[in-house]
Amino acid sequence: MDYEEPQFFRVMQYARRADRDVVDMVSGNPDWDPPEGIRDGLRDYAEADAAQFQYAPSEGLRRLRERIAARRDIAVDRVVVTNGTGEANHLAMLGGLDHFPGEEVLLTDPVYPYYAGRANFLGATPTLVPVDDSGHLRPAAVREAASEETAVIVVNTPNNPTGAVYGADTMAEFAAIAEEYDALLVSDEVYDHFDYAGRFSSGLATGSPNVVATNGFSKSMAITGFRVGYAVFPPANGPTGELLERAKTRHMLTNITTSRPAQYAIERALATTPPDYYARCRDRLAARVETLCGALDDVGADYNRPEGGFYVMARFPSFPGSFENVYELIDEGGVAGMPGEAFGSASAGAIRFALVTPRVETAAERLRRFFA
């Protein structure tokens, strides 16, 4: 699967050019306020002395890494702070392709397109493994697809775009497959705060030396513009320890470091944000899931109710989700979604809707009218 054209922006730009009001359900930009600690941290940082305006340590501010390590119950030296979760995934996938034999990356179908694009960029062979009818990637399907050519297996939980959430037993099976085939499991957990099923389990819980977990704060703190993520690598003194040192070197050569004020503000927010903040965000999104899914039921759409994250993939009778039909839905219905074909062959014909807009009720009513 190629991802050379920025297809998300293609649809968003079409919606912006429309001559009517359109509810944007394409992008994954949260629409709520960040924790107050973000603003407090930025205000305080503005008054810091000149030394604080210089390079941060390449692997990330120590206090931020300590808070991440405490949450993950791992040693702080395993944490590398990156320029968004995207860089964390890049470093993990590149490290896996270098360290392990083979040139294949196993991905889910449907897949978040940037994983496939990154595999192409790295010169790897992406292989898409179809999910089952419930939207879940089954370990048996991964095992059947895996071979001596497999170097990396990428799992996203909660998943974009299917909404699937994987529990401890499933994650342990994914890790076991990675070990069996001498590959790396990259577990992207950027939506972990949005688990409605109560089943999420981090890849780190497997204790496998063949797992790198990636995460960030863009979604959970509604700060996509800050570009701060992180990766947790296996211990440096273990059998896959070189993954950590190579990632640090590549991060330094590419970026030197990550934004110091952004890290400072996030560390403040981690220290001061109560659990209620995340619970309110989760409850808000769960209510939006109910609203949109109610409309989908009314128009006879086929969909999987998301167990986590904030996306819904739906199929409408006699209205396949091609780019052409998505444009028609924008022009005639006033709702912008993302064509399923952008996520792989398994979702061709579907439309993915992002729930990060306060206008979900408006979108639901417009879908009812359009498909009446």
Image (spheres, rainbow, N blue to C red):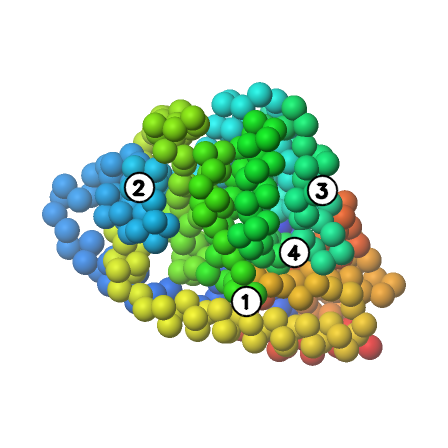
Indicate the position of residue 23 as horizontal and vertical percent values. 62, 68
Tell us which disc is closer to us: 1 or 3.
3
Is 68 left or right of 369, judged from the image as shown? left
Q: Amino acid at mark 2?
A: Ala
Disc 2 designates what residue? 75
Checking the image for residue 162, the label placed there is 4
Could you say whether the residue bearing mark 3 is in a helix, strand or loop? helix
Checking the image for residue 196, the label placed there is 1
Checking the image for residue 141, the label placed there is 3
- Residue 3 versus residue 187: which sits nearer the camera? 187
Specify which label sits upstream in the sequence, 2 or 4.
2
Name which residue lies at 76% across and 56% down.
133
Specify which label sits upstream in the sequence, 1 or 4.
4
Specify which label sits upstream in the sequence, 1 or 2.
2
Could you say whether the residue bearing mark 1 is in a helix, strand or loop? loop
Quarter of the image where one finds residue 164: bottom right
